[in-house]
Image (cartoon, rainbow, N blue to C red):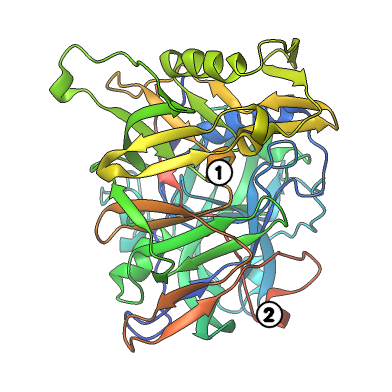
């Protein structure tokens, strides 16, 4: 499988909160919460998602992590003056924010995920301004290079082509985004800032279909064009955020700011990567450590795992996947296995899966472990029918290294903590309905941020809150 992306990313100029002092929260909901999903849709979602992993992004995460119910998470943001609400995919794998705009060709008009779609109308916002190709910010979007054939008053165009062939094209616009600043325990106030984002005028492929339609995508990665990077560059926040996905109640927590409670153990993020990569040292099934092959030059060999909240399942290279499955299924040798939708291994089982199947423990650098329980890596499609969420990826990075992609299957019910200031990433098992405590950088005050479940009918302006969850996007290539 080849995952490829070509894009021209936007540059966010956010100007709100006191320098270094702002903690923000986002209300989010899982995209398929409350909807039945076929197993093919789950896998297809991930295939499209892997093609959409863009430049480095970090954003807040939430929703229901059960594979039989979930897909992408989405958040509500306010744009323009006066502000209107828009529902956007939140992703830790890209950097650009874009929304469908008035006059768009092939933009979806309705959605099957129970949200009301809205086209952004630059003429309807008193503060919207199109960016021209001779402006410095447009050059920044192109990585600082000179825009070829630029003429005065020519708009700054963008095109993003995703790995599944879907594409979005439009013009960059500058306007206000409305977000939530934490001002006390479980208290936020609406704040706004000027940003530059894509105003889509044409969609193609899956981006134009109604089954998974939203108003756009918001990226939250490590690149300079992401929200977290722009806020940090302007001294508004530190490049630190966390999310917690609640697989039981849905929704969860996503907050930008330094988490002081609970304490989270971390592992280094591999430098110079476009996504959130960490070193995977080993895998245990029950008490048995899998005997995995070692590279030809052991000192240079490493297994990389990508942490991605925008992916539903978990994907392992074949030489990890096959022995893992053998050990898991070996715990119940009498099972009659069925292949569902040509790819999922399923079976009937009417007892407690946590008693009948082994834990899977992923081992990382700095002695960090990630425990995945049977009720997390197994999911029900009927009362007595279970399927295995581990998938065989067969994926390698561009330099030939194996790639493990860890999605919501293993991230659910854990607080995931990203500290880009120190280039570390970590997690801890956590009740996502509980609050977390964050320290405000400037004043040193500590505030509690709680869980949220996004309700589509309520306006972000009315409720005084915004997106809760879903994270950052990363400019991301896998071949």
Q: Residue at x 55, y 43 (%)?
A: 310
The image's mark for residue 126 is none
Q: Position of residue 56 (x, y in %)?
A: 38, 47
Q: Residue at x 66, y 53 (%)?
A: 63
Quadrant position of residue 452: bottom right
Residue at which label 2 appears: 461
Quadrant position of residue 86: bottom right
The quadrant of the image that shows the C terminus is top left
Q: CA distance from mark 1 to mark 2?
A: 26 Å
Q: Position of residue 59 (x, y in %)?
A: 49, 58
Residue at which label 1 appears: 310
Task: Decide if residue 87 is on the left or right side of residue 397.
Answer: right
Q: Nearer the viewer, mark 1 or mark 2?
A: 1
Quadrant position of residue 463: bottom right
Number of marks in the image?
A: 2
Element on which disc 2 rests: helix
Q: Position of residue 132 (x, y in %)?
A: 42, 60
Q: Residues within 10 Å of mark 1 (few under 14, many from 20)?
A: many
Task: Decide if residue 162 is on the left or right side of residue 249.
Answer: left
Q: Residue at x 78, y 24 (%)?
A: 349
Can the viewer see residue 476 in this picture? no
């Amino acid at each position: 499988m080849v995952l490829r992306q070509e894009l021209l990313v936007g540059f966010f100029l956010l100007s709100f909160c006191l320098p270094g002092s702002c903690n923000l929260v986002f209300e989010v909901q899982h995209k398929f919460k409350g909807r039945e999903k076929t197993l093919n849709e789950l896998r297809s979602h991930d295939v499209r998602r892997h093609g959409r992993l863009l430049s480095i992004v970090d954003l807040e995460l939430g929703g229901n992590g059960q594979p039989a119910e979930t897909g992408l998470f989405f958040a509500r943001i306010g744009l323009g003056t006066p502000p209107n609400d828009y529902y956007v995919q939140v992703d830790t794998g890209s950097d650009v924010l874009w929304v469908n705009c008035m006059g768009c060709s092939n933009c979806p008009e309705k959605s099957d995920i129970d949200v009301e779609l809205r086209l952004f109308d630059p003429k309807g916002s008193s503060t919207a301004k199109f960016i021209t190709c001779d402006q410095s910010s447009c050059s920044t979007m192109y990585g600082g290079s000179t825009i070829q054939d630029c003429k005065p008053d020519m708009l700054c165009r963008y095109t993003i082509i995703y790995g599944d062939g879907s594409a979005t094209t439009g013009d960059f616009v500058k306007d206000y985004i409305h977000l939530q600043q934490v001002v006390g325990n479980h208290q936020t106030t609406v704040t706004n800032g000027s940003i530059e984002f894509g105003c889509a005028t044409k969609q193609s492929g899956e981006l134009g279909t109604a089954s998974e339609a939203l108003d756009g995508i918001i990226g939250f990665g490590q690149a300079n064009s992401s929200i977290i990077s722009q806020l940090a560059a302007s001294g508004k926040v530190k490049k630190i955020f966390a999310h917690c996905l609640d697989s039981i109640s849905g929704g969860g927590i996503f907050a930008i700011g330094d988490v002081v409670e609970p304490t989270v153990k971390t592992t280094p993020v591999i430098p110079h990567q476009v996504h959130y990569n960490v070193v995977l040292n080993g895998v245990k099934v029950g008490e048995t450590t899998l005997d995995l092959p070692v590279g030809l030059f052991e000192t240079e060999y490493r297994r990389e795992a990508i942490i991605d909240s925008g992916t539903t399942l978990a994907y392992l290279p074949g030489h990890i996947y096959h022995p893992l499955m053998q050990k898991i299924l070996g715990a119940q040798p009498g099972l009659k296995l069925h292949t569902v939708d040509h790819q999922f291994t399923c079976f009937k089982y009417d007892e407690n899966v946590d008693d009948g199947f082994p834990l899977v423990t992923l081992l990382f650098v700095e002695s960090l472990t990630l425990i995945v329980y049977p009720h997390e890596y197994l999911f029900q499609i009927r009362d007595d029918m279970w399927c295995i969420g581990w998938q065989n990826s067969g994926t390698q990075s561009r330099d030939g290294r194996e790639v493990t992609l860890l999605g919501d299957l293993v991230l659910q019910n854990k607080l995931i903590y990203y500290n880009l200031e120190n280039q570390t990433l970590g997690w801890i098992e956590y009740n996502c309905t509980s609050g977390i405590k964050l320290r405000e950088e400037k004043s040193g005050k500590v505030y509690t941020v709680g869980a949220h479940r996004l309700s589509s009918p309520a306006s972000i302006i009315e409720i005084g809150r915004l997106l809760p969850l879903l994270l950052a996007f990363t400019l991301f290539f896998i071949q």
